[in-house]
Amino acid sequence: MAGRRSGPILFIVLVLLSSLLLTGSLAMAALGDAQNVGNLIKVVRLVTTEYLEPVSVNDLVNGAMKGMVAALKDPYSVYMEPKEYKHLTEQIEGAFTGIGVYINKKDTNQMVVVSPIKGGPAERAGLKSGDVIVKVNGEDVADMDVDVAVSKIKGPEGTEVNLTVFREASKSLLEFKINREKVNIPVVTAEIAKKDSHVGVLRISQFNMTASSEVDRAIQDFKDKKVKGIIMDLRDNPGGELRAAVNIASHFVPKGRVVSVVDREGRSENYETTREYINIPVVVLINGGSASASEIVAGAIKDSGTGALVGTKTFGKGVVQSLIELSGGAGVKLTTAKYLTPKGNDIHKIGIEPDVKVEAEKANGASAHGGEEADVQFDKGLETLRTMMR
């Protein structure tokens, strides 16, 4: 009988629960909420003795961990099974197999395409910035953590993923069938502006593990070419590693604080500059897709007064996630702190306003940028930079 199988499972859960209840503040919480603890034990017993189908300990424990983190109602915190955690670490390292698209959550029920990677499968299929992903292979992703949704979009090279997308411009649902490929993330591009040989253009698409060293090389190249000003394009950059953001911002702010990270107890850790200040004018292009680490860089430059921000208000993600690997390859991405700009500004759910506001021209419902031609934000950035260079 199924009831005979419940003994070992119930014993394991009770042992785990008991060990947790004997530690720290959770013990006090348990004493004040004994009814819920009793209900938890009862639900475990019911599931293991009464549910129609056999249930594995692994499924129950995974479900409990996912539910515990989901109860935080934080779109940036999630428990990930090994496959999901592996996909996330691959993206941080700079390469993955998928369709080549950055997505983020503008709120708790919209999975928004920040930008497709140039030349990748998603861009070739017609996916655009601002598209809202509604379903992946027929599964609703509205309530999913963004990294879980990403893990479902990714998959083995040569396989296909079906996306249902809402496009605001046409007020319609669109269906896309996209083949997955090996995608190398183009993190940094650096070149001399076509419209001004004295200006270096630095485009950063993500702050992953390779970004800061790539920017170091680009800055040295600009010095060798004796550029007189830099346009740094952070539009639609969804963020990435804190340390990469600090290293990159350090080129553009004087010696001192880049960002402060504040934990739940109010303890603050200050991240100081790590590179030599290049001391030439800089304009940073930003928009609603500039998030997290992008906002650290933009906020540091704005607060220090060493450059100008041009474009539209940033996304407004001012919280820090820690990645904690668990045994067996699983992991937890947990919001553990918030960050403040050097002047102590909390920009979470607020964003950073540009010094010069310029709306992007629209093309088929998406922002038209990525090159110098027909890019009104770039043109205004160049005009602003030339004023600063005089």
Image (tube, rainbow, N blue to C red):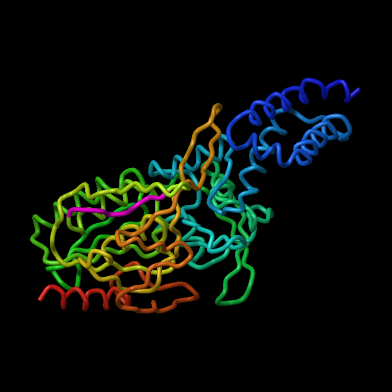
Q: Main secondary structure of the magenta part?
A: strand
Q: Residue furthest right?
A: 1
For the point 30% across and 64% down, the residue is 233
| Residue at 39 percent of width and 79 percent of height | 359
Please give left or right for residue 341 compared with residue 169 in the image: left
Q: Quadrant of the N terminus?
A: top right
Q: Between residues 33 and 83, which one lies in front from this camera angle?
A: 33
Q: Residue at x 32, y 52 (%)?
A: 245
Image coordinates for residue 153, horizontal then vertical, percent: 56, 50
Q: Position of residue 85 (x, y in %)?
A: 52, 39
Instruction: Say whether residue 21 is magenta.
Output: no
Which residue occupies 70% across, 23% down?
A: 15
The stretch drawn in magenta includes residue 258: yes
Please indicate whether residue 145 sits to the left or right of residue 18 in the image.
Answer: left
Q: Is residue 251 left or right of residue 365?
A: left
Magenta highlight range? 255-262
Q: Position of residue 236 (x, y in %)?
A: 40, 63
Q: Position of residue 343 (x, y in %)?
A: 30, 62
Quarter where residue 142 is shown: bottom right
> On the rendered image, what quadrant is the C terminus found in?
bottom left
The answer to whether 33 is drawn above or below residue 201 in the figure is above
Front residue of 143 and 128: 143
Picture quadrant of residue 117: bottom left
| Observer-nearest of 178 and 73 | 73
Q: Is residue 10 left or right of residue 324?
A: right
The image shows residue 302, relative to residue 15, as above or below, that is below
Tell me which corner region of the image, top left, top right, bottom left or bottom right, holds residue 89: top left
Count of marks, rendered view: 0
